[in-house]
Image: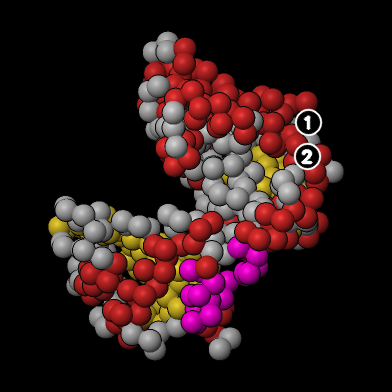
Amino acid sequence: MKVLVINAGSSSLKFQLIDMANESVLAKGNCERIGTDGSFIGYKTADGGKVEKKTEMKNHTQAFEAVKDSLLDPAVNAISDLSEVSAIGHRVVQGGAYFDRSVLIDADVLGKIKELSPLAPLHNPAHIQGIDACTAVFGTEIPQVAVFDTAFHQTMPEKAYMFAVPYEYYEKYGVRKYGFHGTSHRYVSAKMAEIMGKPIEELKIITCHIGNGSSITAVKYGKVVDTTMGLTPLGGFMMGTRSGSLDPSVVTFIAEKEGLSLSEMETVLNKKSGLLGVSGVSSDDRDVTAAENAGNPRAKLAHDMLYYQIAQYIGSYFVAMGGCDAIVFTAGLGENQPILREGVCNYLSCLGVDLDKDANNAAVRGKQGMLTKPESKVRVELIATDEEMVIARDTRDIVEAL
């Protein structure tokens, strides 16, 4: 079975074609600037070369036409006919309380994804466009599956997902913690159990997805008991441009002093805060690191805050789970910034984390490996995440069961 994995954004579309017989990636690429001037598609050829083509993509349907053409490109050597694509799996950010697992897409599922759009206004409408465009290009015969970022977190107990605001807002609007990056946390927690040679039902694992967008999740015996992101991906600790959780009065105080509207204040918190806001340098950690190394005190402060906040959440999840067997770092920064992992683990030495600095420094670019010494009470591991594979596997399982 060959599964096409789709991650549709408002102006972008990422894709991978995976042969589930051996879980090999046959093709991958992305469409950028959909709906604007200068749109293009980039993808890799069979020999490892890269192709970038400018092509008009006024909407997602035209983007899927470009994807189809790239899959059929002889230079890619992925498929010779669209009929070779057996199923399509879509990443969907917000599944709310409706979905605790991946599902076959039908009219009812589409309706619920649309209904949940107010909780993910930048994402769910784009996913709907992607699904509709996919149907227009590939037809109705190919089954499509929705894999939700929020589904893995639906095992959280009420005490973890409820906010201390009037209960009526939960009843009327679904105001609660949902969590995100669920496919990543699910993949690396299962992989950690596999590496340790133990059933995940016997382990307490803290997974740290650290990138431009970041979240940490407590996985106790295979079930999520808490996670850092909340109603939206803004919650938790500071990120590239996001503030993370803060005193709500900070929002009203700044808005009043600066004369900002709610939407303007939301922009400040989502796009002008985090590493960018504190350092004044960039949202890209590589730039912030270079600035810190050059003696920029605000860049150093941004990193000090980030490491401290990550360690705080990890420590709190020790309490939430009654201990911890393993900590996993994954995603862009988690996989590629040894100094971040060291900065966080230095705080955790009191909890039994004994970092092996040489192993940690050698672990970059997704190189899987143990980062702690053998005598460490808590094992810390780097595991490269693979959200696309989770989507492909779920899609295969659902379609094969039809």
- Secondary structure beneath dot 2 equals helix
Q: Position of residue 290 (x, y in %)?
A: 39, 21
Q: Residues within 10 Å of mark 1 (few under 14, many from 20)?
A: some
Q: Position of residue 214 (x, y in %)?
A: 54, 42
Sequence order check, earlier mark of 2 and 1: 2
From which residue to which does the magenta span run?
96-114
> 366 or 324: which is nearer to us?
324
Q: Quadrant of residue 134?
A: bottom left
Query: Which dot marks residue 229?
Result: none
Q: Amino acid at mark 2?
A: Phe
Image marks 2 and 1: residues in contact by CB distance under 8 Å: yes
Query: Which dot marks residue 318?
Result: 2
Query: Which dot marks residue 351?
Result: 1
Is 104 part of what is drawn in magenta?
A: yes
> 327 or 57: which is nearer to us?
57
> 172 or 80: which is nearer to us?
172
Looking at the image, the residue that sits furthest to the right is: 322
The residue at the point 57 percent across, 53 percent down is 180
The residue at the point 63 percent across, 26 percent down is 308
Q: Position of residue 82 (x, y in %)?
A: 29, 82
The residue at the point 27 percent across, 55 percent down is 32
